[in-house]
Image (cartoon, rainbow, N blue to C red):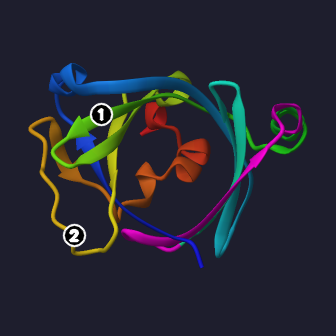
Amino acid sequence: MAVEIERKFLVINDKWRSNILSETRLKQGYLSNRGNASVRVRMGAGRAFLNIKSATLGVRRCEFEYEIPVEDAEDLLEQLAMRPFIDKTRYKVACGSHTWDLDVFHGENDGLVVAEVELDSEDEAFEMPDWAGEEVSGDPRYYNVCLVKHPFSKW
């Protein structure tokens, strides 16, 4: 079974910008968010993915991801996805021995900046960057699937 272990933090300043490895504008929409799992489509940089993730809270979740044709992703987003879409720029940011995913949200979630670090185990040590603030790994408000129904601009 595919397992994702990630910790999520609010970003408190722009010091991360000096360690950017890459950036990609992403559009994602959710096809389903029912009880035990969510199903989403994500597009960016000319590629598209279908993702299925368990709805459990915390840092460990089941996750399956499959590349799909961009044309299929466009159709799925247009015809089946909940609105609004998640619109964000994802930056890959180096910190210590890890590469963090830092998401700067746009649209209805403008103003929200969140960073995630993927780990091999729940107790794996990692360097805490000086731009990372409060940990929100267990707070469902910061899950992308929840930001569709309750955008940051409406908090």
Task: Classify the position of the N terminus by image quarter.
Answer: bottom right
Q: Is residue 55 toward the left or the right of residue 136 in the image?
A: right
> Is 53 rendered above or below residue 8?
below
> Is 11 rendered above or below residue 97?
above
How far, Cα to Cα, is label 2 from label 1?
A: 19 Å
Residue 85 place in picture, x, y as percent: 66, 34
Label 2: element kind: loop
Corner quadrant of residue 10: top left
Corner quadrant of residue 108: top right
Residue 55 place in picture, x, y as percent: 56, 70
Q: How many labels does the image show?
A: 2
Outermost residue on the front side: it is 97
The amino acid marked with disc number 2 is Glu
Corner quadrant of residue 75: top right
Q: Pointers 2 and 1 in contact (CB under 8 A)? A: no
Quick one: label 2 or label 1, which is nearer the N terminus?
A: 1
At x 54%, y 52%, the residue is 146
At x 58%, y 51%, the residue is 145
Crowd rating for badge 2 (residues with CA inside 10 Å; few <14, some 14–19, many 20+): few
58 in magenta: yes
Label 1: element kind: strand
Outermost residue on the left side: it is 130
Residue 74 place in picture, x, y as percent: 83, 31
Q: Report which residue position mark 2 lands on.
A: 124
Q: Report which residue position mark 1 lands on.
A: 93
Q: Is residue 39 toward the left or the right of residue 22 in the image?
A: right
Residue 119 place in picture, x, y as percent: 32, 63
The amino acid marked with disc number 1 is Val
Report the span colored magenta. 56-72
